[in-house]
Image: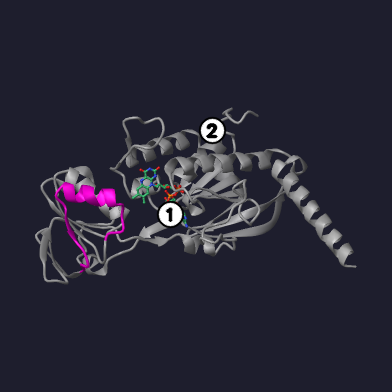
Amino acid sequence: MADFKVTQIDDNFDFDNLSWWDVVIIGAGPGGLAASLTTAHRALTTLVIEAKDTPGGQPQFLYADKKIVDVPGFPDGISGQELSDRTYRQAVDAHVQFRFNEELTAIEDTDQEVQGDVLKKVVTSKGSFLCRKVILACGLLHYPRRMAILDALESDVVHYRSPRVKDYEGATVIVVGGGDSALDAAVMALQRGARVEVIIRKEPSGKADTLNHVVELGGVIHTSAEITDATLNDGVISTVLNDGTKIDCQHAVIQIGFLSAKDTFEGLGLTLNSEGAVAIDPYFETSRRGIFAVGDVHGDIKLIAVAWAEGIQAAIHAFREITSPFWLNEKRLNDNKLALIAERLSSAAMQKRE
Ligand SMILES: Cc1cc2nc3c(=O)[nH]c(=O)nc-3n(C[C@H](O)[C@H](O)[C@H](O)COP(=O)(O)OP(=O)(O)OC[C@H]3O[C@@H](n4cnc5c(N)ncnc54)[C@H](O)[C@@H]3O)c2cc1C
């Protein structure tokens, strides 16, 4: 089958009574969505498990309103939200099935076999699913790091992602954090008419260009600064910094990093590379057979288009393994050849020693 031929699953297919899935994908970010529509376009039954309540990954939960300008095909740019919505709709149209608010916790090997594949049991926070192949596309970032002093206000104007466009107009916004996400959030708020004060615990660590942009747009930067007190009155948050500065604001946007998804994949018994990310071979397969990894979870180049491309490639390798006999599979043939060469080399070395 040509790699671009689309063979869609029948509209009336009964997904509820499947004994096992062809492919289970962890994460509905760019990598997972691209992988899912690729396997579904090859008529493989495909389930995506997503920990959050919405698809899209980082472009949706980190920078929904940012104009993304480096994705091919969108010369005028596209927002993170729209890109996520479009890719999700494409996957839904291809009959990919989704489970939201459900988190991967383990992947177990079973003693059931289907056409040479040992079925895997994907265990989640809410249940388990049998499948032939797993594609990990869970990224490296997970839930935002929280700030107790502002959480204690229990206010809906304390945000862990940038609020929607209209929310800023005429408001004072404090942005807590000095990395790229915080500086991007500050630029977004300034461009929408807000007054912005950026509170950074040490020095800024985001891109110098973005920092300059914040300053040019009138943003005020406080370095070596921490919020030591915060109260809420009539929708206004009054904060006091460690140097005694008082700032009142209508919104607080906290961008102080993320809890890593590393906990998830460290528990899966996968070999990690020297950077602590999941190690893969040229076919995107991890050290556990039948488990692939794509996008930020292993990648050096962290871009939407790269996550898409890797998701698509892993999906096609998984498809080839599922549909071609084991002994004709290109990867397995190469693996066997390498194993044979290694065996010959070691027996030659043994003979020399004798
Ligand atoms: C501030 C910022 C701006 C950026 N701007 C750009 C840009 O302009 N252009 C560009 O190309 N790239 C940009 N990037 C990079 C880009 O967003 C990432 O490279 C891309 O999102 C990686 O996609 P992914 O699918 O690998 O992972 P993610 O987008 O991280 O998606 C992973 C998904 O997996 C889910 N997940 C995690 N753990 C579990 C679990 N245990 N169970 C179930 N689900 C789980 C997560 O909730 C998430 O939805 C930016 C990144 C940042 C931080």
- Residue 5 marker: none
Q: In the rendered structure, which amino acid carries the disc numbered 2?
A: Asn
The percent position of residue 210, horizontal first and vertical second, equals: 26, 49
Q: Residues within 10 Å of mark 2 (few under 14, many from 20)?
A: few
The percent position of residue 61, horizontal first and vertical second, equals: 34, 49
- Is 315 magenta? The answer is no
The percent position of residue 116, horizontal first and vertical second, equals: 73, 48
**Which image quarter is the C terminus in?**
bottom right
Distance between the alpha carbons at the discs numbered 1 and 2: 27 Å
Residue displayed at 51% across by 39% down: 309
- Is 211 magenta? The answer is yes
* Residue under pointer 2: 12
Q: Is residue 317 visible?
A: yes
> Taking 251 as reference, is 206 left or right?
right
Q: Camera-side residue: 41 or 277? A: 277
**Which image quarter is the N terminus in?**
top right
Depicted 224 relative to depicted 208: above or below: below
> Taking 109 as reference, is 52 left or right?
left
* Residue under pointer 1: 51
